[in-house]
Every structure is written in C-alpha cells, then in structure tokens.
Amino acid sequence: MSTSQSVSPALRPPARLVSPRAVHYWFVRALAGWIVLIAVQVISWVLDWPVPPWHAQLLAVTVILAAAHLVVMPRWRYRVHRWELTDDAVYTRTGWWTQEARVAPLSRVQTVDTERGPIGRIFHLTKVTVTTASAAGPLVIDGLDDEVGITLTAAVTAAAQAVRDDAT
Amino acid sequence: MIGEPADTPTTATHPQDAEPEPREAAAAADDETPWRRLAAGMLLVEPLRELIRFIPLLIALIFAGRAGESGPPWGLIGTAAVIALGIVRYLTTRYRITPTVIEVRKGMLSRKHVTVPRDRIRTVDTSAHPLQRMLRLVKVQIGTGSSGHRHESVDLDGLPANFAMTLRAELLHRARTQPELPSLSAGALATPVAGAVPTGPAKSDTVTTPVTTPVETEIVRLDPRWIWFAPATLSGVVTGLAVIGLTWRVLNEAQVNPADIGVVSSTLDHLETTPIWLDVLQVGVGVVLLVTALSVAGYLLTFWGFRLSRHQGGTLHVTRGLLTTRATSIEERRLRGTERTEPLLLRAVGGARLSAIATGLRAGRGATRGGEVLLPPAPQHVAVDVEATVLRTPSPGQAQLLPRGKAARRRRYTRALTVTAAINVALTAWWWFGPLPAWVVLTSLFALPLAALLARDRFRNLGHAVVDGHLVTQLGSLVRRRAVLDEGGVVGITLRRSWFQRRNKLTSLIATTAAGQQKYAVPDLDDTAALRLAQQLLPVTGQFVTGVTVRPDAPDPVAPGALLRGEPGVTRLPA
C-alpha cells in the first residue's frame, strides 16, 4: 500500500475485445430475466396472493435492482470480456463483478464448439467454447461477431491439431 | 458348479474353454470369434437379487393378505415380471473379445451394440456381490478413460471369476509378456481366486500365490485396529438415516403402527417416567452408540480385506469389501496425484483418508467420491507413507506449506462473521416482529464465536507449495483436503478475482486437470504469488504477464470507476 511506484508482475488483458454489439446482447439477455421476475410479482399483486407479502415494496426493490443491473452490467462486462489466441495458448477474460482469466495451452485443447442462441442470433453474435480434457474450466468467449467466431474456431482447431498430444 | 441349462456350444462359460480363445485368435479371425453369453449362473443370481430387492414389498403382501381380502397380487405379478426381465436380459446379452476389440450386444426392444477398441481400455474393474461370490461370478467393468461426465464403460455383469481375472490381467498388461498366465492355467481349477482379487472371504488373506508375488509389491493392507477410526468419519449418520427410512417403509407397507411394537412402546413408557434432562441424555447416548455401531459396520463392509499393491505392469491394484468384493486397478500412467482428506472429527483423532487423482476413473459416490480409495480412514502417518510410496517421492507429503497473507486471513473472518451476523440480525428481527421465541435468538448468538473459530481454522489450514514437480494445495476446515497434483497434469489455469478480492489484491488460482475432481483450487493468493504460481504450473501463461508500473490506487483498465468517470480503457485493438 505504501509503495507509490513499483514494478510488479501483472496479468495483461487479452488483446482483443468482443463485438460492441455484445453490450446490447447482454442487456437484452438480462432484461428478459428481469421481465420474467417482475411479471411474476405483478401477477401475484393483481391476484393478491398472500405468499410474497409487501407487494409494492418488493416490486419497487426489484425494479431498482433491475435498473441498476441493466445500466451497469453490460458496459462493465464489455470492458472485461476479452480474448487472445497466440501460437501456443488461448487466453480469455470474462465476468464483471467476479472476473476470471483463463489460460489453456493449445496442446491441451480438445474441442472447439460454436453456439448461437436465440438472442445471440438477433445481434449476429456467436459463442465459442474451447474445452480441454478437464470437465472444469472450459474457455468461453461470448459475444463474438459471427465472422470472427468462425475464423477463431477454424484457427483454434487448426492450431490445436498442429500441436496436439494426448491432451490429458 | 450349478446346472447350465442355457448352455449351447456358443455360450461356453467354463474358464478353461473360454480363456484361450481371445488370446490365441489371430487378428484376421475377428469375424469368426464366437459371441458368448454371460455365465449361466446369472440366471439364478438376477432373479434372486430382484427378490431381495422386493423383500419389503413381499413382507407387506404377507401382512396385507392376513389382514383381509385384497385385489390381485400386484406385488407378486411385479416380482414375476422383474424376474422375467432379468432372464430376458441374460438371454439377450452377448459379448465377444477379439484380438482388437471388445463387443457387447444387449437389449431386446432397443438393441445396443457397443464396441470398445482394446487399445483404448484404461481400467478393468471387477466386483462381486455375495450371491455372485457363491457362484464364483464377477461383474467386470471396462472403462475407456474418458474423463468425468463423458465417461464410457462396458459392463459384463456375470463372468466366471477365473476367466474374468485372466481377461483383466490381459487387458491391462497387454504390453507385457504375460507372466501371470501360467499361474492362471495352473491355479484356475484349484482356486478360483487368482492374483489380488479375492472372491472368497476366507481366502482373501492368503491369495498371494507364489507366481504373482514377484511381479506385485504390497504397499499397504488393512490393519484391523484402524476400524476405530470409523466412528470419527460419521458415516454411520447417513447409514442410520437410511436404516430408519427403510424400517419406516416396511412398517408402513405392513400397516403397523410403530407404537404397537413391544420394544418401542416400552422404551417410550420408560422415557415418560424419567425427567426430561435424563431423556435427552439417554437418547443422546443411544444415538451415539447407534452411529458408532453403524459406522463400524459400514467400515467393515466397505474396507474389509483392503489391500493396495503395485504391479510391475505399471498399475496400482486396490481390492476391498467384506460381502461385495471389488478390485480396481489404476494405471500409473494415468495417475496425476493423490488427495488426503481429513474431516474434522477424523482429524481430531489423528486419522486421514487417501484417494487417487487419476484420469479415466469413475467419479463415484461415498467412499470413492473424487477418486479411488488408496487408503481407508487410517492413522495420518500411514496416509503420508502410502502417499509417498504411490507418488514415488516423499517430498510433497512432507512439504512445509506456505501460509497465505494477512488479507486472506481477514477474508476468512469477514466471510464467516458476516454471514453469521446477518443470520443473527434476521432472527432478531423475526423475534421482534414475529412469533420467534427469544431463546432461539440467544442460542444463535453462540454461532458467532463458533464462526470465528471456523475462520481461524480455515485460515490455518490454507497453504500451498510446489515441490518436486507437484502442486500441493491444502484447504478447508470441516473437511480438510490436501491435494498433490502433478504439474504435468495441469491442462489449464483460471485466475478468479471477485470485486472484494481485487480491492484486497487477492487472486484465487484454480488448476484444471483431466483427473479426479477436475479442478484444484489455491484460494486467495497475493496477486503476484498467484501469477508466479500460474507461470510455474503452466509456462505458456508467461507470455501474458508483464512487469508493469502500477499506481497502487489504480486502475485496472477495466475498473468500474474508470468506466464511470469516462476514462479511456485499454483500447489496444487487434493487429
């Protein structure tokens, strides 16, 4: 804390950002979740269910939380989500409140999956998942421009094949 | 031997007939290898096992029949159907072993055909429950070593024991020049118990035949005194609940009111005559005795005859079980480390368990959760010794672990106390506004010091080291785990930081691997220590680490503050 200037090792961020459209994508995705929650509360209020008491207050809290989440999360996430492919490794960073940096050597890569969900398709965005032999910790790059996604998938697949070993 | 009514020339079940076939068949003869059925004894085993499973229902039927006239005997019809299914399963299951593959066909309505190339076989495990042991049959599970949820295995439930042992040895040690084959042909008829795989209770201690001794070294076998560690594992609690559940079901089916049973009602009457504090004491002692008895029984059932040995062919063999015997082998090539587990009570009495971290092992439940057992609950020093022998180096087990810093300690206390305090506040509010009695709130206050103790222990147990090419990481309090993981087994690194961790310059490192629990965490390292460790475990991480000038108060380029103030983030875009 006392050192004002010091050189210490740090993890540099991965070089490439995801598509700027990902901000809208995350917004819509989160909005869908909040709408469901708010709809349930409104219905319970209209039908006057006894189960959640304090309908108005609860709804107010939910709306405030939703608004805060929708304003902060997508842009914060966009600053965090990054990826990089080098000659011998894949490197990703994800999250917002809790952030995760993941590194996997290409020699340990087993599969590369491409996925376009219903919301992702609206924004022409692709999710690329790079898995290793471990059931834990696949590297997920969400919100990639479709074309970048295809290129990346091909590149990782080719590179992984070139350096492939037993992978476990 | 029992009669074999279903025996036809293509369903040879005699080991002496079956065993030479797969070995001596030429590669070209793949198509001519005959399909075989499982041992005919399974025709007896399957229905009997189903009957045993239906015992509660049958008891209920007897009671119901006595109580009065009822409808059609559904229970009997169901049992008959299940028996018929078992017979059909036997009749429709066929397998064959060619020089290159193992094939299994099963199912009547939906036919299933599984082919496993022999060079993909990683594990060959055998088990035999008491019924099978009486008929000298075993279940063989052949695993192909895919990890975790993608695991595939082929089960051959009901092979003659001798044949199964030959098969197992052959599949696992295909590269070697099959030195144990003479022992099998010599001993096959005399003793069906071959090598390290006991199929008879009395013989399990004397099976080390002269022929197998030179190729196999025993690492450890069960010391009966270890059974006194059983109560400390509290495994009896789970068993106790299961027994109570089963009893309840039987009584329910039989429509018996528990209070009508002599023992129960006299016990209840007795408790009514004594003061309440004595009741609590009596019930408490009763529960402790019951849990102890059940734990010991469970330990005996699971671990009796436990033996761990190393085979020259490069495998570790584990055999265990009192009634149901199991034999598991772990290829050392697939071994990535070991994990020592010490639940709080077991740790208090100086005990520990040891399991293997290996790829391609089923992630089981109970005793085999997180890896095959290398040592049942036993004295800690034995666990350390076995660990050293298995890993072929004592240093990871003896390594002095590096403690974490002050921030990590603070985080342990903050987390434990915040959660407990929040619960306290909630309970107090409930008492203030609602019907909660005051003594609940007062009692809950005792949770605070307990939480502090827990935090203290959790911090003291945190530690890691990199020794001799192995990552050692220890964590946990209620269950302390110390994992030793081969650096070569690390297939990825995750560095996780929550907002609180970023403020405190802490990073949790998670090493992912294809073995055991798939990931092993080193929580709350200082940022720089985490980066150093990451580079050590996975050198490719180095290219992403830079020595940079940092102002302490700032900005990770992606800090939310930077975002809200509109400062430019890192805008370095791809070339």
Image (cartoon, rainbow, N blue to C red):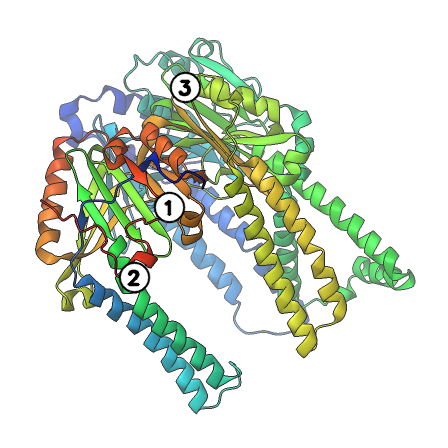
Identify the residue position indicated by label 3 in the image.
B468
Question: Visible in this render: residue B199?
Answer: yes
How far apart marks 1 and 3 lie (CA) works out to 26 Å
Circles 1, 3 touching at the beta carbon (< 8 Å): no
Q: Earlier in the sequence, mark 1 or mark 3?
A: 3
In front of the other: label 3 or label 2? 2
Residue A23, position as x, y percentages in the image:
22, 64
Q: Disc 1 versus disc 2: distance between alpha carbons?
A: 25 Å
B185 relative to B88, above or below:
above
- Provide the chain ID for the residue under circle 2: B
Name the amino acid, label 3.
Asp
Residue A10 placed where, x, y %? 31, 38
Amino acid carrying label 1: it is Arg
| Chain containing mark 3 | B
Residue assigned mark 2 = B565
Q: Quadrant of residue B17?
A: top left
Q: Which residue is the site of mark 1?
A: B496
- Tag 1, which chain? B
